[in-house]
Image (cartoon, helix red, strand yellow):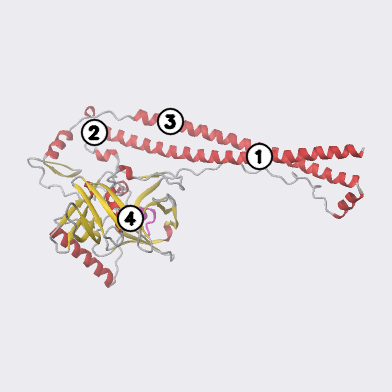
Amino acid sequence: MADLQINWDPLVLQKAQKMEQKRLMLVELLEIPDTETVIQDYRCKLRRGQNNPSGRVWITQSYLLFMTNDRTYKEKIPFCRMHAIVLEKSLFGSKIDIDTDFGKFNFSGFYHTEEVFTLLEHLKDYQPTYAMVNDANPVEPDEYTTSSSSSADTNGPTAGESSTSDGPALEGRWANFADSTQYATVDDYEAVDLATSKSALDTLNQIKATQADTMQKLQDQNEALDRVDLHVKETKNNMDRADRVIDGISSWAGQVKNTVTPDLYKNGIGKNWQQPDRAINFEEAEEVIDVAILFKHSNDSLEPCVLRFGEKKFWCVSMVTGKKLKNMEYVYSVVGAVVMRARHQHLDIRFNDGTERFRCMSSFVQGITNELVIKAPHIGVVFEPGTKRFQYGSLQLRSSSLCGSRNINSRNSVFQDDARFSITPVVKASTIVDRAPEKVRNDLDEQDADLQAVELAVAEIESMSVAISKDLAESNDRLDGIIDTLDKTAVKIHKDTYRVKRMN
């Protein structure tokens, strides 16, 4: 799909120009790679040792940069070397402490300290990621390169270099390592353990079958309870009618009451009774894709969230509360366009039904765009001036464009109010070991498929267990109701028996 062409508002062009000016200044003064772009910048103070200068921080995809207003003091902190970021609040203001492997930094004096902290945390955990499908063979899902890859040397490898048809040339010690593994055989690799994953899958399938049988037995039990409940209610109805007859026989007042009031019990209970449907329904596990984002509220504050893509709709779940954000669920048909904003790593989702736009910042703007276009090919994609362009609308890009976590512990799983199965796409194992023999790569792919099936089976078993527990709770409530009705009926039986004896 071609990018949409737009006559840009002067304000958009002005913002793009300012962002480019900031980028060029940082490349020159702080000597960062030319590929870095400015995401956000803030005024602040830095305390490190005896230094306590005022200045400004710039946040790029890979760095937190600081420079004083007179440009005499500079700091360059890569996100990959940060160990922890801590937000400290007090009556005298908030500050952000950053622990790195080359020292500690303390930043204060921000106007929006929590916003800065949230943004830094996201970029520390998630490396902004882009991928590109190999045009030479676009149908192979394994054929891709990352955006940071350089082109292979068309003249072939020279001394100290190595190259293959699948990737860029390697130099130095990595070239020697590549050469040592390029011609490895199956015997050189540890055997892929397919038996364990298949055994686990078989066991889970047996558990699913057992639970399905349990659900059928519960259905039969519920239907039996329905019949018991009917008979108990019919018995109570008959006793209520007998009570009415005894009233009419035992006194003239009872005769008058029966004459002037309708007989509510003459038709019985079971005349029009039908067996309710007691089948136990459960929500089948849906494989959804989670993408870490920072949702941008109307007041421009940022909230760590997950943008969750299902088969028919997508929605936003807060990482803070674990709950779905209110009114943040959308069907794909109402999405009109995805807009890459001039402020890098920021994205808008625009809707064609008048719904307010969805704004977010994410390290995975390509992954979000790709997923939306896959689900709804009618969506337009807009790149504001100066933004990074990328491929989208391809299943081949899904795993490679969403695997930029710097910290595996930051990947998100199922949330409190959403029991559906979620998966964070990762690059297939056969892609990582693309130099391995074909049998090894095929076995790894088979193992990956088995493990994914195991995850889905676990999710379905969990969903079935929830449905069974809910049904058991409802059955217990119904049993309590039946016992209560029986108790009331027994009281009436004793009462009416006593009254009949007195009449004799």
Look at the image and tell me whether residue 33 can be seen.
Answer: no
Expressed as whole percent of the image width and height from the top left, the position of residue 145 reads: 23, 47
> What range of the chain is rendered magenta?
368-378
Name which residue lies at 71% across and 45% down.
273
Q: Residue furthest bottom?
A: 10
Alpha carbons under labels 4 and 1: distance apart: 54 Å
Q: In this view, does 286 lie to the left or right of 145?
A: right
Say what amino acid the circle numbered 4 marks.
Ser
Q: Residue furthest left?
A: 159
Where disc 2 sits, the SS reads loop
- Eye-nearest disc, 3 or 2: 3
Magenta-span inclusion, residue 265: no
Which quadrant of the rendered structure holds the C terminus?
top right
Alpha carbons under labels 2 and 1: distance apart: 65 Å
Q: In this view, does 330 lie to the left or right of 110?
A: right
How many neighbours does mark 4 have within 10 angstroms: few (below 14), some (14-19), or many (20 or more)?
A: few
Alpha carbons under labels 4 and 2: distance apart: 59 Å
Residue 437's label in the rendered image is 2
Alpha carbons under labels 1 and 3: distance apart: 39 Å
- Eye-nearest disc, 4 or 2: 4
Return the disc, 4 or 1, that comes first in the chain's sequence. 4
